[in-house]
Amino acid sequence: MTLEFTHSDAFTMGVELELMILSTHDWDLMRGAEDLLALIEKVDHPGEIKPEITESMIEISTSVHRDYREMLAELEAIRDIVLAQAQRRNLAIAGGGAHPFQHWAEQRIFPKERFFHLHEMYGYLAKQFTVFGQHIHIGVTSGDDAVYLTHVISRYIPHFIALSASSPFSQGIDTAFDSSRLNNINAFPLSGTMPFVKDWADFNAYFDSMRDLKVVESMKDFYWDIRPKPEFGTIEIRVCDTPLTVRKAAMLGAYAQALARHLMLDRPHEPTLDAYRVYSFNRFTACRYGLEGGFIDAASRTRRSLKEDIAQTLLRLAPHAEALGSMEALDEVRRCIDSGENDAAWLRAQLAATQTLNDVVRRQSALWAGTRDASRTGQT
Amino acid sequence: MDDASFLPTFPFAAANLMLVGAILLCGLAAGQVFVRFLRLPRITGFVAAGLLLGPAVLNLLDQSMLDELSIFVDISLGLILFELGRRLDIRWLMRDRWLFASSVAESMLSFLLVFATLRLFDVGGVYAATAAAIAMATSPAVLLMIMHERRAKGPLTERMLALTALNNVFAFLLITLLFGFVHLEYKANWVKAVAHPLYLIFGSIVLGYLAFMVARWLARWLGKREDAQFVMLLGMIVTTVGFAISFKLSVLLALLAFGVFVKNQDRQHDLMAVEFGPGAQFFFVVLFVITGAGLQLSELAVAGVVGAAFVMARLAGKMVGLVMFAPLSGLTKNKGALLAVGMVPMSAIAVVMVQGASALYPEFGARLSAIVLSAVVILELVGPLATQWALTRAGETEATPRPPEMKP
């Protein structure tokens, strides 16, 4: 049985965000997904709102977009609906890749067969999977394009990690990483990258053998950083932490969209194994140091700062963003690297100002809600 | 005999310390027995230990000893009411107006049904009204203990605490206003009938506000250190209890107000949401054992039928009110019913309220206690079980995790 690859319009996009459900009493995670989803079910809303593996998580996803501004508007609308229903239960919502001080052992698996199955299979890893990521989908016209794009976009994965990093704190401590979340994913046996297959037929052969060996049952069992998603007709970038605002989430989507257009139309790279040789190291550096990290370019065999590599990429993406109408988003990426401040830096600054992680979470929840002065509003 | 002065003399010099220690250990042991062998809530064990040791059965803890220990009861109630006040989030009430409406409904219906029931049993008007007002309040002590013990967490748990905070406020206010009628019943003049409730209500709220202002100032000075803020809050709570007693104000209302101000008026977030945790457990155990010792089974014999009717009417009021309003807050009726069952406990605070009335007019207190305390005996033993059952049923207590089976 071969996997059918659904055709999509090239360079369409959509994003999924996993969000925290919080208690407004102590700002710890709160088991409220079931109750909240029951409330949301009764109101009209765009996109999709679904449960995730533990009961303190909720996932929102947009519909398919071509235009950055429309996607941002939809994200804002979904955010406001979730927030309004959460407030009826005195719950708060926040972005961020990891809750700063929750204890994973206290989390509870959302009552759904698939999640129980994952818990049985992975044991404590399933509960430690209470981390919050953004997934970006980019439409491609065929399976062959999906395989090609998955390979060549892997070089840029550190960009996405550093720009989105928002999980400096985990289990009550500063991890020294900008994105600690990705370390949780590394433990899964089928994490990492797609093998070096050359086209969709080759991919199918690989998938069939893995299925015959009973290693996997479906595409869902691969926890790769980037994976083709045949039923959507997309490739899915899964390395981003959920940013602290929907604006940044839309920015990352638009950056991926412009990058995909550049890679598919200008064809600046061919897939090489060389690029994968430095992949893990670049990925680690981006997690650990964020925008302040270094970057090894396998093609030119040179080292530069990650900021410099993003700046050069932005120059090449400009005409594509122009064509897609997303210059605004690229300007925002530019501001991020100019200031050197990602969400992880913002979170660390809040801890310095307030001295407690509870206050940090309170402020990040106010920032998510889109209130202007995060330090004054969203208080309990 | 001078030569033997180094030997102990009777009565022992530190009898009180022995007493407190013994109460703590007996309570602890009974709690353990209840959990391990009877699979009942630990609190029921504490209360049962008190009942056994107290005047009702063995009389090892007699009334004079209980009076000496009243300071522990005051401090424990202060802690609990403060904690409860911190659960009253005014902003939530503004956002979910049906929450407030459902609280008014369940409180009013509990009052009306209990009042009507007591009138059927020919209980006098003022007594019936005061007893019915006491019936409005849910015991925060039992709820907080059960939630702590079962590690309950979730939207229904939060809602139950908010509704409990509200029904306690309603009950305090109503009882205080009824004091005016009690004065009239005992032929006091009008000035006293009006001035006393006003003094109690406004005096207690002002005291709570002052306590909040001092606590916030201290918190700013101390900084965000959890251990320091913990001790500071404990100190402020005990001091406030002392002031409330000295100024003849309501300990309950003052401490509840203190908590409400901390939750809603601390705009700069200087005060941390410290958990009282293990330190408070000491007070809780002592509180429940003493409460148990205060129970009198003889009341049950005298007023058992009235007590049982009281309990049923009270549950009916809460059930109807909460189930009726549940859909308006987007809750299922089933969840509304679980809220009502969870809010069954009525305990130590009712006892204190009865004592407040007794201090005023002993005859009034005696007549009231016969009615209320028989209901308390029933609910003290059944209440914790009801709360535990409701929270477990709602799926918000800590479930035993499914054992992970690794696939080959």
Image: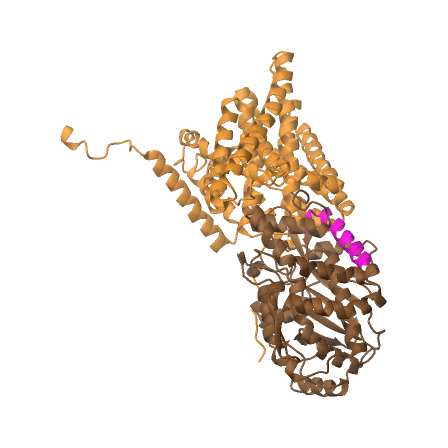
Report x, y in % for residue B322.
72, 43
Report x, y in % for residue B406.
57, 75
Chain letter corresponding to the colour orange:
B
Considering every residue shown, the one lying at the far top of the view is B189
| A74 drawn magenta | yes
| B246 drawn magenta | no
Report x, y in % for residue A365.
67, 51
Q: Nearer the viewer, residue B278 or A287?
A: A287
Q: Nearer the viewer, residue B272 or B18?
A: B272
Q: Quadrant of the C terminus of chain B?
A: bottom right
Q: Nearer the viewer, residue B58 or A266?
A: A266
Side of A138 where B343 appears, left or right:
left
Report x, y in % for residue A354.
57, 46
Question: Residue B64: in sight, yes or no?
Answer: yes
User: Is residue A77 placed above or below B83 in the rendered structure?
Assistant: below
Q: Quadrant of the rendered structure where residue B117 is? A: top right
Q: Quadrant of the N terminus of chain B?
A: top left
Identified at 75% across, 57% down, the residue is A247
Q: Nearer the viewer, residue B358 or A28?
A: A28
Q: Which residues are magenta?
A: A72-92
Question: Residue A65: in sight, yes or no?
Answer: no
- What coloring was used for the rendering? by chain
Main secondary-structure element of the magenta-colored stretch: helix
User: Is residue A248 placed above or below B319 in the rendered structure?
Assistant: below
Q: Quadrant of the rendered structure where residue A143 is? A: bottom right
User: Is residue A75 placed above or below B3 in the rendered structure?
Assistant: below
Chain letter corresponding to the colour brown:
A
**Tag count:** 0
Identified at 72% across, 35% down, the residue is B104
